[in-house]
Amino acid sequence: MTLFEKTAFYVGILLTLVLLSMIFFSKNGIMDYGKLKKQEAEIAVRAVQAAKENQKIEKEIKSLKHDINYIKHLAKHEHEMAEPGELIFKNTSEKKETMP
């Protein structure tokens, strides 16, 4: 090999290494592609969770609009309400024990 051929060979190798490093580490390279795929998977999981929560909320809205027994249940257990003529007994001894 002549000096020119050797120089061209090494320049070719150097250019190949530079191009490969650009493919891997540039702004739109393979490393960024992997990060973006990971973010896409995380967002897809959050989207599925949001869809499930939306279905749950839609079901609750439908129950609140049409199911009188569900409304009564919520009134009794979450808002401590009672129907006319219904008695509610509360245990106050636990509150007294916790107070010094």
Image (tube, rainbow, N blue to C red):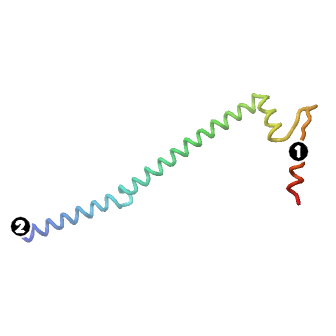
The amino acid on which the numbered mark 1 sits, given as a three-letter code, is Asn
Instruction: Tell me the residue that label 2 is attached to.
Output: 1
Mark nearest the camera among 1 and 2 is 1
**Which residue occupies the extreme right position in the image?**
85
Q: Say what amino acid the circle numbered 2 marks.
A: Met
Is residue 31 rendered to the left or right of residue 42? left
* Neighbour tally class for label 2: few under 14, some 14-19, many 20 plus, Cα within 10 Å: few
Q: Position of residue 43 (x, y in %)?
A: 51, 47
Question: How far across and how far down the image is residue 40, in percent?
Answer: 47, 48
Is label 2 in a helix, a strand or a loop? Answer: loop
The residue located at (11%, 68%) in the rendering is 6
Residue name at image x 92 percent, y 35 percent? 87
The residue to which callout 1 is attached is 91
> Dividing the image into 4 quarters, which one contains the C terminus?
bottom right
Q: Quadrant of residue 88?
A: top right
Q: Position of residue 53 (x, y in %)?
A: 63, 40
Asked if labels 2 and 1 touch by Cβ distance under 8 angstroms, the answer is no
Q: Residue 76: where, in percent of width, then height?
A: 83, 37
* Residue 62 to residue 21: above or below: above
Q: Residue at x 36, y 61 (%)?
A: 26
Residue at 67% x, 35% y: name it: 58
Q: Measure the alpha-carbon separation of dots 1 and 2.
A: 99 Å
Above-or-below relation of 32 to 59:
below
